[in-house]
Image (cartoon, rainbow, N blue to C red):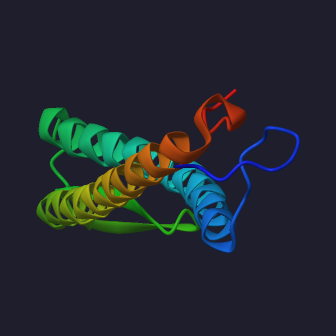
Amino acid sequence: ETPMASDGEVEVRREDQLKINEFGRLNAKLHEARAERDATKKLVEEAEDATTELALAEDDGSGAVKLMLGGEAFVDVSEEYATEYCEAEQERLQAELDEHEATIRNIADRQKVLKAELYGRFGSNINLEEK
């Protein structure tokens, strides 16, 4: 049975407030994780594009290409080195993207549990949905 306050509202216990606070913190983390995932996804696509461009590039005979490092400087490297670099960067970024996806899943799973508990206790007196 759910204890009611005198005005017919469900009493908010300390443990309820802790769950509500956890849900709010998770929601902020979820938004942050999604933004990081989206930014990483863009970098993965750029690395894929760079790898594809290298594969399709016309060889001018020099065997050298310009590789931008850290968005700061171009350096002349062999086409083979540039390809290896881009492929390694693509793999690193894909692993980072997979981590973001796992974080998002874990947060969503925990939020699902908290929603069930909080809606079970408060019903329509609480709103945990995004606007």
Q: Nearer the viewer, residue 96 or 58?
A: 96
Q: Nearer the viewer, residue 71 or 31?
A: 31
Q: Position of residue 42 (x, y in %)?
A: 43, 42
Instruction: Please give the name of the residue rendered at 18% of the width and 65% of the height, measured from the top-left corner.
Output: 88
Q: Quadrant of residue 26?
A: bottom right
Above or below, comparing residue 8 to residue 47 in the picture: above
In the orientation shown, which residue stands out farthest toward the right? 7
Tell me which residue sits at (58%, 34%) in the image: 123
- Residue lying at 35% horizontally and 67% vertically, measured from the top left: 76
Q: Residue at x 16, y 41 (%)?
A: 59
Residue 94 screen position, x and y as percent: 24, 55
Q: Residue 9 is drawn in which quadrant?
A: top right
Image location (x, y in percent) of residue 71: 55, 62
Front one among 68 and 115: 115
In the image: residue 128, left or right of residue 45:
right
Up/down of 3 relative to 25, above or below: above
Residue 81 x/y as whole percent: 17, 67
